[in-house]
Image: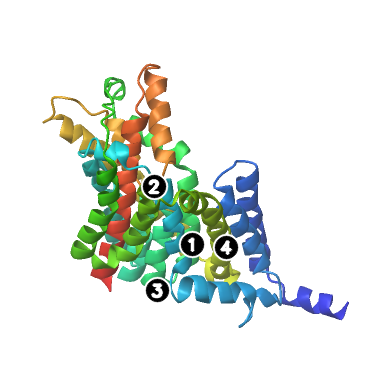
């Protein structure tokens, strides 16, 4: 009874507010099926670390230890997750239509605009750069950049990044419609199912890793793990390991990552006015990444005989495979016979590579 009284005395309204935020994340994960593998452990963790006298965030508490070892000391968790993501990705559609690489690069525009805007508002450059990377809609990259740059708003950036990943099917259609005409959205594209040789599939992750290491050494951690996972997939001799990496392994890392991130969701560091500003800036970055990809596709059409459906530019963000699915659904809605999925997947995996490289470039430029 005495312990209960002491706990109640230590309880603050800020901690209760974090319980509500944690409950909201759990609701979105269960009821709305929004990134449940991550939002559910994050929501539960937010409640767990904001209980009065909670031992999990003590010096040697379990969540403190997971955070120090898995994120703070080495960024191991987000990097290991990239191995699983690499195993999930098929670069075939991209290799059969290499010009889709351009859309993946253009769809990073919002990152740089947001960095400038955040710096103008008054955020230090390390925080501004960390906020800008939210636009990539790539949670692991956002975690790594924010951690590497030592951002004070690590938790807010992480929560916002994953939340907007989950909101891709809601936000992107509205943005795409504002940037395109009905005629442009109805552009049909033939998919040439060119056979990409096994040798090319094996060489591709190796070549990308080498090139990334030469032009953006700080991206190697991200790109290297992503491409290593893809090499596991394509080599053909490690099928069971590849399947494990993209299912069981990735799921376990995601769950641990979600509850570990909660270490930074303690009320004292999370409930700030800056958190709301970061949410607004993150949405701005996400929207203008989508706009950048769409406008790039429209610009390419000025010089192309075979027109590109501008909606493919929206798939150039890193949210894989959600962005590709959004484009496919929008294409079918405009014309039931217009299937854009394979083209969209090509742009989407290009965005995966581009966001990892941009993350490394930002780290190298800021530090």
Residue position marked by numbered label 4 in the rendering: 256
Q: Earlier in the sequence, mark 2 or mark 1?
A: 1
The residue depicted at 25 percent of the width and 40 percent of the height is 95
What residue would you read off at disc 3?
150
| Quadrant where the image shows the C terminus | bottom left
Q: CA distance from mark 4 to mark 3?
A: 21 Å
Badge 4 density bin: few <14, some 14–19, many ≥20, Cα 10 Å: some
Residue 133 percent across, percent down from the top left:
35, 57
Disc sitting over residue 156 in the figure:
1
Cα–Cα gap, marks 2 and 1: 40 Å
Residue 184 drawn at (x, y percent): 27, 24
- x, y percentage for residue 229? 39, 55
Taking 272 as reference, is 228 above or below it?
above
Q: Residues within 10 Å of mark 3 (few under 14, many from 20)?
A: some
Of tags 2 and 4, the one toward the viewer is 2
Tell me: 333 left or right of 358: right
Residue shown at the point (43%, 46%) measured from the top left? 88
Labels 4 and 1 touching (C-beta < 8 A) = no
Among numbered discs 4 and 3, the one appearing first in the sequence: 3
Determine whether 236 is above or below 12 in the image: above
Front-most of residues 291 and 142: 142
The first of marks 2 and 4 along the sequence is 2
Label 3 – label 2 distance at C-alpha: 40 Å
């Amino acid at each position: 009874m005495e312990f209960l009284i002491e706990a109640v005395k230590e309880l603050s309204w800020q901690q209760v507010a974090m319980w509500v935020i944690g409950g909201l994340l759990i609701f979105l994960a269960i009821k709305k099926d929004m990134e449940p593998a991550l939002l559910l452990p994050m929501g539960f963790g937010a409640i767990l670390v904001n209980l009065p006298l909670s031992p999990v965030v003590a010096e040697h508490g379990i969540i403190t230890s997971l955070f120090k070892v898995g994120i703070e000391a080495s960024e191991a968790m987000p990097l290991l997750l990239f191995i699983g993501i690499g195993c999930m990705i098929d670069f075939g559609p991209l290799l059969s239509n290499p010009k889709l690489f351009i859309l993946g690069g253009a769809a990073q525009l919002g990152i740089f605009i947001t960095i400038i805007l955040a710096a103008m508002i008054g955020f230090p450059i390390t925080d501004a750069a960390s906020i800008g990377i939210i636009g990539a809609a790539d949670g692991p990259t956002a975690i790594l950049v924010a951690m590497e740059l030592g951002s004070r708003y690590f938790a807010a950036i992480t929560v916002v990044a994953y939340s907007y990943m989950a909101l891709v099917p809601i936000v992107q259609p509205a943005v795409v419609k504002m940037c395109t005409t009905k005629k442009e959205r109805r552009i049909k594209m033939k998919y040439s199912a060119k056979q990409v040789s096994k040798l090319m599939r094996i060489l591709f992750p190796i070549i990308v890793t080498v090139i990334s290491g030469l032009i953006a050494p700080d991206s190697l951690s991200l790109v290297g793990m992503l491409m290593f996972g893809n090499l596991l997939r394509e080599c053909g001799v490690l099928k069971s390991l590849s399947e494990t990496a993209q299912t069981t392994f990735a799921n376990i890392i995601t769950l641990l990552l979600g509850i570990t991130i909660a270490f930074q969701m303690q009320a004292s560091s999370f409930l700030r006015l800056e958190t709301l500003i970061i949410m607004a800036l993150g949405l701005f970055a996400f929207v203008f990444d989508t706009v950048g990809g769409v406008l790039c596709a429209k610009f390419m059409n000025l010089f192309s005989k075979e027109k590109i459906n501008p909606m493919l530019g929206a798939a150039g963000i890193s949210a894989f495979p959600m962005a590709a699915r959004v484009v496919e659904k929008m294409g079918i809605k405009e014309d039931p016979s217009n299937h854009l999925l394979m083209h969209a997947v090509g742009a989407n995996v290009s965005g995966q590579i581009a966001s990892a490289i941009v993350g490394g470039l930002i780290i190298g430029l800021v530090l």
